[in-house]
Image (cartoon, rainbow, N blue to C red):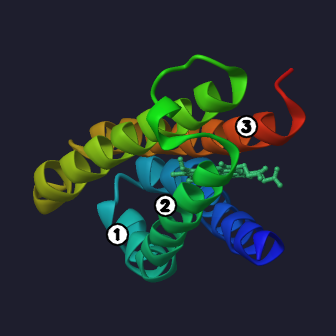
Amino acid sequence: MLWLILTFHVLGASIWTGGHLVLATTVLPRALTAGDPGILLRFEQGFERIGIPALVVQVATGLWLASQVSDPGRWLSFADPVSAAVGVKLCLLAATALFAANARFRVIPTLSAESLPLMGWHIRAVTLFSVVFVMAGVWIRTGGF
Ligand code: HEM
């Protein structure tokens, strides 16, 4: 069972983090240089179809994995290295949700060449969170640095 859940978790991580790295390092610079929000929106429409299900899979499999390695009552205690890594993941999830909601409901509806740089900072932040998600996951198995 663990191998199957972990396979879905790592597959979801490949999609979520990989997609954001492609977005932040190739699509976003192209959109900023051209001053064309359409370049971003076209990528996001395609990516959303696989990216959002991947994030849902991450949360569901992640909560199950977390319950295997640490007692739920300790997840936000930061009392030991494993609970701390789970706590970091939960904080990253909250931060990702805040940035995604702000982008979706406040920035994207009026996205223009002028507001592209603001959208760019949202994308860079969520990409950074996605990389730290991977690092915190690896810390759990390896015990940190
Ligand atoms: C986009 C979000 C996420 C990404 C990219 C991600 C990525 C990863 C990666 C790469 C691993 C390493 C797997 C390994 O060592 O074999 C991992 C492990 C883990 N993740 Fe996540 N994760 C995400 C979300 C979550 C969430 C929301 C939770 C729940 C708190 C979570 C809990 C865990 C746990 C407990 C492990 C350790 C599994 C083990 O070693 O047995 N993850 N994650």
Which residue is at the far top?
79
Residue under numbered circle 1: 41
Residue under numbered circle 2: 59
Residue under numbered circle 3: 135
The front one of 56 and 1 is 1
> Does the beta carbon of the residue at mark 2 sit less than 8 Å from ligand 1?
yes
Residue that appears at 48% across and 21% down? 77
Q: Looking at the image, can residue 124 be seen?
A: yes
Q: Residues within 10 Å of mark 1 (few under 14, many from 20)?
A: some
SS for dot 2: helix
The front one of 27 and 137 is 137
Amino acid type, label 1 = Leu
Q: Looking at the image, can residue 21 be seen?
A: no
Sequence-wise first label, 1 or 2: 1
Amino acid type, label 2 = Val
Give residue 2's position: percent from left, percent from top: 78, 69
- Disc 1 to disc 2, how far (Cα)? 25 Å
* Whether label 3 touches label 2, CB < 8 Å: no
Sequence-wise first label, 3 or 2: 2
SS for dot 3: helix
Q: Is residue 45 above or below residue 118?
A: below
Give residue 75's position: percent from left, percent from top: 50, 34
Residue that appears at 39% across and 76% down? 42
Residue that appears at 74% across and 64% down? 10
SS for dot 1: helix
